[in-house]
Image (cartoon, rainbow, N blue to C red):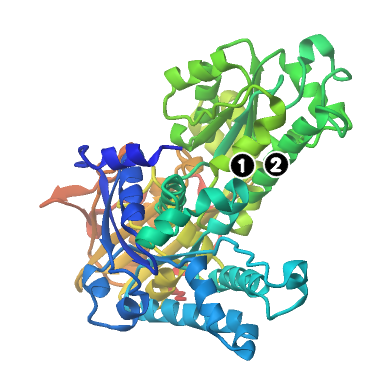
Amino acid sequence: MFPFNELRKNLKKDFSGFKKIKIALLSDSASQLLNIAIRGYGYHVQLNFDIYEADYDQIDLQIFDPSSELYSFNPDFVFINRSTEKLLRNFYHKDKNEQADYSVANYQTTRRYIETLAQRLKSKVIINTYPEINDNVFGNYAAKTASSFIYQLRKINLSLMDLSQNVKDLFICDLAALQNQYGYPFVFDPRLYVNADMVYSLEFQPYIAKNITDIILSISGSFKKCLILDLDNTTWGGIIGDDGPEGIQIGHLGLGKVFTDLQLWAKQLKQRGIILAVCSKNTEEIAREPFISHPDMALRLDDIAVFVANWETKVENIRHIQSVLNIGFDSMVFLDDNPFEREMVRTGIPEVMVPELPEDPAEYLIYLRTLNLFETASFTEEDEIRTKQYQEEAKRNRLLQSFDNENDFLLNLNMLADVKPFDVFNIPRIAQLTQRSNQFNLRTIRYTEEDIKQISADPSYFTISLSLEDRFGHHGLIGIIILKKEDETTLFIDSWIMSCRVLKRGMENFTLNAIVELAVFNNFGKISAEFIPTKKNGIVKDHYLNLGFKEQEGRWVLDVATFKETNTFITNKNKTWTSTRF
């Protein structure tokens, strides 16, 4: 973790060229140091945080007064930071009945905050859980009585989590979890509290800043998607080539517990949608054997999307894994016990995250948990089948190698697309695509579920969702198009987003055919488009040029009357989709 003084020094550095994000910081305690920490941490992730810091203890005034500075600032994010110390002080001023209902009153206040902000802003809202203070008025009996502060505090934290499940644009900065990791004496500085009414220690400020930044990055589409595992002395103890399957350390005894627990952690990540890959210097047949036959292995071959075991360098093999998965290197985390291999990967592919694992394997998982490597802003059912989809993609790539002619390969896939407007069933995944997609994203506009619902119901918009299946399986939802009426004759492509898993399958041309079909059905003569470059979407910089659009005054324009449909090897199973509206 970067120390606070380093974050303070970062404020003197050049932030020009970094993406600007506006944050409103509302706190019931002095927040100057937190302001510095958040802005300084932004430098390390190349974000320019423009922060409006409200006056001390002005949360209610800022939120409930429609003329407050908060609303004129119009932030992208609102961070409501409330302290346990203030919560405890207010609790002591309540009578017995009010104390017993303290969590309910807190929940109602929080809900009013969120509802008021939602009515007046389109901002994402971040609130913190409360670090625990046990005042020991009741001792251990506190867990048995609703009149104790600790009982009410725990109910409050649970109610915040419940509320966030029902409000899509509400996110939790879990300070209570951080306190569990580092302890209350690390979180709270009594001297700062007495002298400056600051409740968090100087050392703890960077941890809050990182958590806030992690949330913002995940919402903005920057997050880790893949965990790459070395095998010997990382996934199991020992060297498989020397010790054999029966000699490696896994299971429920001694050091084996460490590696089994790490495997179980990785398996939970896989079930959450993180792609697992193996990168090992080993003979492949020998490396695969424990996954097949060892009874104590928590991970099996069907948990691994890409398995690479050979005697090439790990830099070369990670490049191969990236080419199969078609995701950015900055979406990858590589775990290896060997300091030499870690440094080789850091030097060869600096975008890959390579944690500096402790020397003692017993500390691996404790250390990894503190890093919060896999922050996410959403979770859908499709995330749970991602590994299967990438395994199917590997089969397609192997099939491709057996054909001399790409058209014969595409024909052999038997591709079937489902084209339809957005509906209530796919809105969560559509919103997730707008938030997560970076490479095949022509304008990189992020939308929430509520935004997508409003667009779907707005007659000035047309929407297209595309799913794809073939002989190997179902890709799921792989593309979305949002079209807006620019005038009576022109449709503007507000968003064109596709999964990189279907590149070179003809989906770009198939999708354009669908867009033109919709335009013709609704009597539009032109289709207008725009490419907004980012650091990650360079692969589509010539997208509209390649599809036959002409550049006109900073836009790309297609004349529907002169358009000739491109033959693809994809069949549309929904022939009447143009007349359907959600």
Q: Earlier in the sequence, mark 1 or mark 2?
A: 2
Picture residue at 45% right of the left edge, 67% below the top = 82
Query: How far across and how far down the image is residue 310, in percent?
Result: 65, 14
Label 2 environment density (alpha carbons within 10 Å; few <14, some 14–19, many ≥20): some
**Local secondary structure at mark 2:** helix
The residue lying toward the viewer, choosing from 129 and 323, is 129
Picture residue at 68% right of the left edge, 67% below the top = 136
Residue 349's image quarter? top left
Across the whole image, how many numbered discs are drawn on residues? Answer: 2
Query: How far across and how far down the image is residue 550, in percent?
Result: 18, 48
In the rendered image, which residue does mark 2 sit on? Answer: 265
**Residue closest to the far left:** 553
The residue lying toward the viewer, choosing from 466 and 15, is 15
Above or below for 467 versus 136 = above
**Local secondary structure at mark 1:** helix
Left or right placement of residue 216 versus residue 55 in this view = right
The circle on residue 526 is none
Q: Looking at the picture, which amino acid does disc 1 mark?
A: Arg
The residue lying toward the viewer, choosing from 326 and 132, is 132
Residue 573's image quarter? bottom right
Query: How far across and how far down the image is residue 77, in percent?
Result: 35, 63
Label 1 environment density (alpha carbons within 10 Å; few <14, some 14–19, many ≥20): few
Picture residue at 26% right of the left edge, 74% below the top = 71
Left or right placement of residue 347 versus residue 471 in this view = left
Q: Of discs 1 and 2, which sits in the foreground? A: 1
Query: How far across and how far down the image is residue 43, in percent?
Result: 31, 41
* Mark 1–mark 2 CB contact (< 8 Å): yes
Q: Looking at the picture, which amino acid does disc 2 mark?
A: Trp
Q: Is residue 575 visible?
A: no
Q: CA distance from mark 1 to mark 2?
A: 10 Å
The circle on residue 369 is 1
